[in-house]
Image (cartoon, coloured by chain):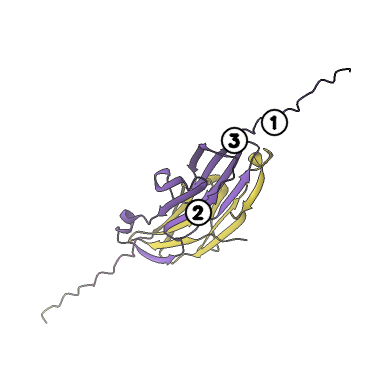
Chain colours: A purple, B yellow
Amino acid sequence: MASTPADVKELPSAYEFVLDMPGLKSGDIKVQIEDENLLVITGERRRDVEKDKEDGMYLKIERRMGKFMRKFTLPDTANLEAIFAVCRDGILTVTVKKLPPPDQKKPKMIEVKIA
Amino acid sequence: MASTPADVKELPSAYEFVLDMPGLKSGDIKVQIEDENLLVITGERRRDVEKDKEDGMYLKIERRMGKFMRKFTLPDTANLEAIFAVCRDGILTVTVKKLPPPDQKKPKMIEVKIA
């Protein structure tokens, strides 16, 4: 299964996964969480069969077609309930929000009594 | 200058050049004819500077940015006055119509007179 280039960025409140997916539409792409913290992105790129029927003949074929997959292990701070995916101009952006930081334990003040 | 994969197809009435251009919009791409029959396609891919200002930090960078160019020599049958370019879902399609075939010279009939 083929791959596709990706950038991964950490923002203050989220992780962002940006993948090149020229020609793919939202319906062609699947974004899933497996094994609790594995972000799995799969898709399939097909040639336009209808157009190919128009008696066309390829003089050159460089663009790769077929299935592809990318996997990313999410950190513990990822909020698996807040994942959003948008595909635009052939680029998929998956945003995984971070969990709010745990309440910082305030130092406990102990009153010093005068003996 | 970088390259980008292309398919070239010959249809009955046109040549079709299909290039992967994820993330590029029509305004980022230039399609020109040089030296009478050279189809030159140039573009530039940039990271989203505004988004990068959001205090983000790249954990992984695989997607290539920068300028790219592709050149194709057009055959004599290409109609340089009928070239159309469309960019959609990160794919550029340039269609170059073919010139109509030259009129076939009809055999000239010579009447055979009876001497």
Mark 3 closeness class: few <14, some 14–19, many ≥20 residues within 10 Å: some
Q: Amino acid at mark 3?
A: Leu
Counting from the top left corner in percent of width and height, residue B11 is at 35, 60
- Give the chain letter at badge 1: A
Sequence-wise, which precedes: disc 3 or disc 1? 3
Q: Is residue A22 magenta?
A: no
Badges 2 and 1, same chain:
yes
Mark 2 or mark 1, whichever is nearer to me: 1
- Give the chain letter at badge 3: A
Which residue carries the number 2 mark? Answer: A70
Counting from the top left corner in percent of width and height, residue B105 is at 28, 69
Q: Nearer the viewer, residue B21 or B15?
A: B21
Q: Nearer the viewer, residue A62 or B44?
A: A62
Counting from the top left corner in percent of width and height, residue A80 is at 52, 39
Q: Amino acid at mark 1?
A: Gln
Side of B63 where A49 appears, left or right: left
Which residue carries the number 3 mark? Answer: A99
Q: Secondary structure at mark 1?
A: loop
Q: Amino acid at mark 2?
A: Arg
Q: Residue furthest bottom?
A: B115
Give the residue at x 48% y 48%: A35
Which residue carries the number 1 mark? Answer: A104
- In the image, residue B113 sits, relative to residue A36, either above or below, namely below
Sequence-wise, which precedes: disc 2 or disc 1? 2
Side of A41 where A49 appears, left or right: left
Separation of residues labelled 3 and 1 (CA atoms): 14 Å
Q: Residue furthest right?
A: A115
What segment carries the magenta color?
Answer: B99-107
Q: Is residue B105 magenta?
A: yes
Badges 3 and 1, same chain:
yes
